Image (tube, rainbow, N blue to C red):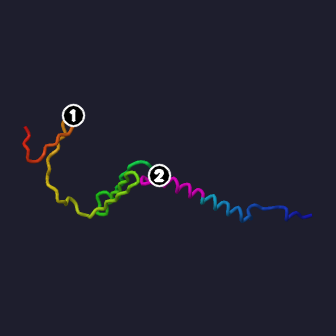
């Protein structure tokens, strides 16, 4: 008697290849979850974070996360421009403390 029908070759089973593909997708999903959890702007994180992208370049952006609020600042490509005036000078003393001297007042 020939038992060819009872001898089952697992290498030819198409269901096993589908199971292997599902295993690969589960690994990919796990890696993506780890990446999302380690992202500094993760919405589930309770930290306040500042993220600077492309520092020092014309396309620099600063993203600030304060609680649930996200604020994004984009560079205009212009350096050192503004409408302010000199308000004074700050000095660091040898003990590490800072002293601010307002503009126009003479120190004694």
The secondary structure type at the circle numbered 1 is: loop
Q: Quarter holding the N terminus?
A: bottom right
Q: Which residue is mark 2?
A: 44
Q: Viewer-nearest of labels 1 and 2?
A: 2
Q: Earlier in the sequence, mark 1 or mark 2?
A: 2
Q: Is residue 4 left or right of residue 61?
A: right
Dot 1 and dot 2 residues touching (CB under 8 Å): no
Quarter that holds the C terminus: top left
Q: Position of residue 51 (x, y in %)?
A: 36, 54
Around disc 1, counting alpha carbons within 10 Å, would you say few (fewer than 14), some (14 to 19), or many (20 or more)? few
At 16% from the left edge and 42% from the top edge, which residue is drawn? 100
Which residue carries the number 1 mark?
95
Q: Which mark is residue 42?
A: none
Confirm whether the magenta stretch covers residue 10: no
Q: Looking at this rendering, what residue extends furthest in the front direction?
A: 68
Helix, strand or loop status at disc 2: loop
Q: Residue at x 22, y 60 (%)?
A: 79
In the rendered image, the vertical position of residue 7 relative to residue 34, given as above or below: below
Residue 36 placement, left or right of 51: right
Distance of label 1 from label 2 (alpha carbons): 41 Å
Q: In the image, what residue occupies the spot 28% across and 63% down?
A: 58
Q: Which residues are magenta?
A: 26-44
Q: Mark 2 Cα within 10 Å, few/some/many (few <14, many 20+)?
A: few
Overall secondary structure of the magenta section: helix
Q: Quarter-wise, where is residue 59 in the image?
A: bottom left
Queried whether the magenta region covers residue 42, the answer comes back as yes
Position of residue 101 measured from the top left corner of the image (x, y, whole percent) = 13, 43
Foreground of the two, 75 or 54: 75
């Amino acid at each position: 008697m020939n038992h060819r029908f009872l001898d089952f070759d697992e290498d030819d089973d198409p269901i096993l290849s589908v199971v292997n593909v599902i295993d690969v997708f589960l690994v990919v999903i796990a890696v993506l979850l780890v990446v999302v959890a380690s992202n500094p702007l993760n919405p589930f994180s309770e930290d306040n974070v500042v993220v600077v992208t492309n520092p020092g370049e014309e396309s620099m952006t600063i993203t600030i996360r304060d609680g649930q609020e996200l604020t994004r600042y984009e560079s205009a490509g212009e350096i050192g421009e503004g409408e302010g005036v000199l308000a004074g000078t700050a000095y660091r003393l040898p003990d590490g403390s800072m002293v601010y001297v307002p503009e126009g007042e003479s120190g004694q």
